[in-house]
Image (spheres, rainbow, N blue to C red):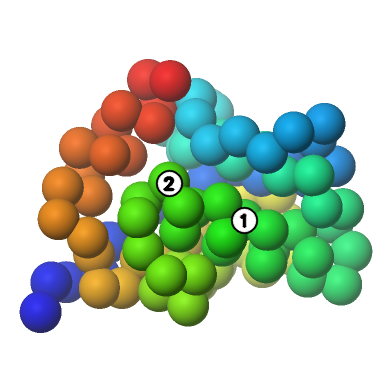
Amino acid sequence: MADAFRFGIRVKPGAKREAVGGRWGDGALVVAVAAPAVEGKANEAVRKALAKAFGVRKQDVEVVAGERGRDKVVRVDPAPAGAAEVLARLLDG
């Protein structure tokens, strides 16, 4: 079984449209979601968006740090094949 894959993200809640891509600050992946930052709605939307981007199930994506802030660390477990390449492509996008 593949190891877990962890990386930093910067969330933009309340965006006009959902988007995963781009680099923030020291290399965090930008994740824009339409859901507001209330009652965990944005975190759920982030998990869904990242699951779609990495081709995994939503339950395989977990916010492991920064639950209540815009800067978070997420874990994809198990890591899909080519996860590092997918992340690199998204960061450049």
User: Which element type, helix, strand or loop, lies under badge 1?
Assistant: helix
The quadrant of the rendering that contains the C terminus is top left
| Disc 1 to disc 2: CB gap under 8 Å | no
Q: Which residue lies furthest to the left in this view?
A: 1
* Crowd rating for badge 1 (residues with CA inside 10 Å; few <14, some 14–19, many 20+): many
In this picture, residue 76 sits left or right of residue 20? left
In this picture, residue 34 sits left or right of residue 10? right
Residue 26 shows up from this direction: no
- Provide residue 76's location: percent of width, then percent of height: 35, 66
- Provide residue 71's location: percent of width, then percent of height: 62, 49
In this view, the residue in front, 34 or 67, is: 34
Tell me what residue is drawn at x 49 percent, y 70 percent.
Answer: 58
Location of residue 65 with respect to 52 vertically, above or below: below
Tell me what residue is drawn at x 48 percent, y 37 percent.
Answer: 29
In this picture, residue 68 sits left or right of residue 31? right
- Provide residue 64's location: percent of width, then percent of height: 50, 71
Question: In this rendering, which labeled residue sits more in front, label 1 or label 2?
Answer: 2
Q: Distance between the residues labelled 1 and 2?
A: 10 Å
Tell me what residue is drawn at x 59 percent, y 41 percent.
Answer: 31
Location of residue 29 with respect to 63 vertically, above or below: above
Q: Mark 2 points at which residue?
A: 53
* Crowd rating for badge 2 (residues with CA inside 10 Å; few <14, some 14–19, many 20+): some
Residue 90 shows up from this direction: yes
In this view, the residue in front, 81 or 29, is: 81
What's the amino acid at mark 1? Val
Tell me what residue is drawn at x 87 percent, y 53 percent.
Answer: 36
In this picture, residue 55 sits left or right of residue 26? left
- Provide residue 62's location: percent of width, then percent of height: 49, 72
Check residue 46 in the rendering and tell me which mark sits there, or answer none: 1
The quadrant holding residue 12 is: top right
Location of residue 4 with respect to 8 vertically, above or below: below
User: Which element type, helix, strand or loop, lies under badge 2?
Assistant: helix
